[in-house]
Amino acid sequence: MTVDSIIFLIARIYQYMIIVYVLLSWLPNARESFIGEMLGKLVEPYLAPFRRFIPPIFGMIDISPIVALIVLNMASYGLVSLIGYFV
């Protein structure tokens, strides 16, 4: 495996963790389960800055995870480009 594929794999896994965490919010009491709490500890520190700057639409639709996924994707491509530039 190359460094590029490892970075993309880690980013993809984290993206899936964010998606599952968001989907758990649609189920009652799912975030209080073991998986929900574990995902919350891993994902919430990354989502918190986005939630601070992006308010929910109409008071209930939170689009900050979408922006966080886009930023994570751009950061992974940027990191791979930087590594490719220096190597």
Image (spheres, helix red, strand yellow):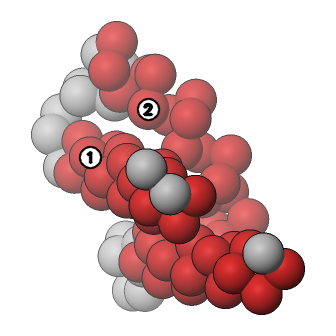
Give x and y (percent) for residue 52: 72, 69
Which residue is depicted at the point 73% across and 65% down?
49
Seen as rendered, the residue at the extreme front is 87
For residue 21, above or below residue 78: above
Image quarter for residue 66? bottom left
Q: Which amino acid lies under the numbered mark 2 shown in the image of this protein? A: Leu
> Which residue lies under the disc numbered 2?
39
Seen as rendered, the residue at the extreme left is 27
Element on which disc 1 rests: helix
Q: In the figure, is residue 78 to the left or right of 56?
A: right
Is residue 86 visible to the viewer in this orientation of the structure? yes
> Which residue lies under the disc numbered 1?
20
Q: Which amino acid lies under the numbered mark 1 shown in the image of this protein? A: Val
Is residue 75 visible to the viewer in this orientation of the structure? no
Give x and y (percent) for residue 82: 76, 82
State the residue in front, 73 or 81. Answer: 81
